[in-house]
Image (spheres, grey):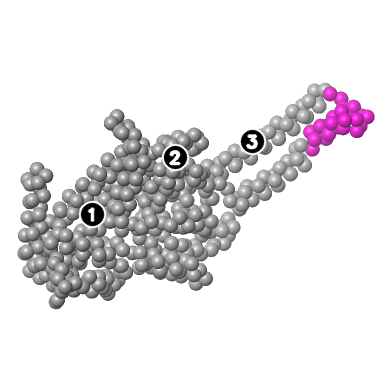
Amino acid sequence: MLFFRQKDDPALKQAALQAEEDLFFVPYSRRDIIDMCLDQGKLAGQEKRFRQLATQLTHLIHFEFHQKIEALKSAYAPMNADFRPSPFETGEEAGHVREFYSLFQHLLEKANYKAIPEEDIQRAFSEDALFTIRLQVDFNSFSEYHFFYRGATVKEECLPVFMGLRSKSISFINYDRVVMYIRWKKTLDSTRKINPEAAGGTALLKLFQNVPRPDLEMLFPNSRVGMRIMDKLLFGIPAAVTGSIMVLTRLSTTLFVLGSLLAFWLGLSSQPVEWNKTTMAVIFAGLLTLGTYLWRQFNAFKNRKLRFLQTLIRHLYFKNLDNNIGVIHRIADDAEEEECKEALLGYYFLLTAERPLTVQETAKKIEDWFLNRWGCVVNFDIDDAADKVLRLGIVRKENGQLAALSLEEALSLLQTQWENLTTLNGLG
């Protein structure tokens, strides 16, 4: 359920409304959906059969997704930096890239992920966010990059400002899940100096959780820590003050001697400076003091950037869920889960309806049920659900209306389909 609390930001309010409209996925597990349906009591005495039907439905959909995973793995293999290239590759890189991205995009759609627009990605570099470090990204290192999200809410947090003396409240869009697809350019000489693990022509897949939209830039693999104006002031002003004090106290004698020598050499003074051990000791002590001060300031600057980098790593450590081939398996599991839940909900509400329903009526009944019974806003993907149950044959369409088969008929039909499938593939 979305909430909005920042009155003066119409753009954020519009984004919140759009995020609510985009909630196509069902935010409950398959097991929860089965229990939630049976909790209504409309299938009293038939609970076991409904659970059997759900299991059989899951088996059929799982087999379909197993084939999708195998196709994706084959298409991704030439771009996967985690594995040794196959000696039998044909070298048709463009074909592999197009095939993989097409299959992967289709899988993401099945899992109810949506693309993040380019303007939202670029906006992340200027928006206020929880992650207060300024980052820089070299976009020239990528042949292409795409981000996808699932689940978006508007959140509000208080951030400390002015070294913790004050705080300010910001509202932002927060993505529950974010998938990143990046393909490196073939030539990566400059990038490899920063990220030695980057391999030209390979594709990087990553899955993250709980990502604020203004912090999207931290997900890029070649992001570099930069310093904001405030950070530079916090570092530069104390350095300038301490430097001035040092010049007035510790370097005054050395500067006087060096000034006298320079004036004599330039003919500005007729008074020679006696060059002896004392003079050399004064100059050496001054240069040593100055060198020590500059070295300390350099180390302080490096340590500050190192602390920023540690903060970045700590954020990513807890947000990263999976990488590369693991992302394919995770998204396929999400897509399979969504397909099963949509099919079960579509079949259940048509089974328990008093009369055949149109597609729109079915969607409204499901959305109203989620809202009124469970307090959850869901924009149910009825078209996808109707396609599945019609394809499986457990729902029939006549005169523009949908009607479900009885539990006995549907279960028998699904069992027959599974037996035919296993026999055809030599699994029986």
Q: Nearer the viewer, mark 2 or mark 1?
A: 2
Residue at image point 36% right, 41% down: 94
Q: What residue is shown at x 31% (from left), y 63% (from top)? A: 24
Q: Is residue 56 above or below residue 5?
A: above
Residue position marked by numbered label 3 in the rendering:
295
Residue wearing tag 1: 336
398 horizontally vs 210: left or right: left
Question: Which quadrant holds the N terminus?
Answer: bottom left
Q: Alpha-carbon neighbours of circle 2 within 10 Å: few (<14), some, or many (≥20)?
A: some
> Farthest bottom residue?
354
Helix, strand or loop at mark 3: helix
Q: Earlier in the sequence, mark 1 or mark 3?
A: 3
Image side of residue 90 versus residue 6, left or right: left
Q: Quadrant of residue 381?
A: bottom left
**Which disc is residue 185 wearing?**
2
Residue in the foreground of this view, choosing between 202 and 334 = 202
| Mark 2–mark 1 CB contact (< 8 Å) | no
What's the magenta region?
Answer: 252-275
At x 12%, y 56%, the residue is 56
What amino acid type should be assigned to the residue bearing mark 3? Trp
C-alpha separation, residue under disc 3 versus residue under disc 2: 38 Å
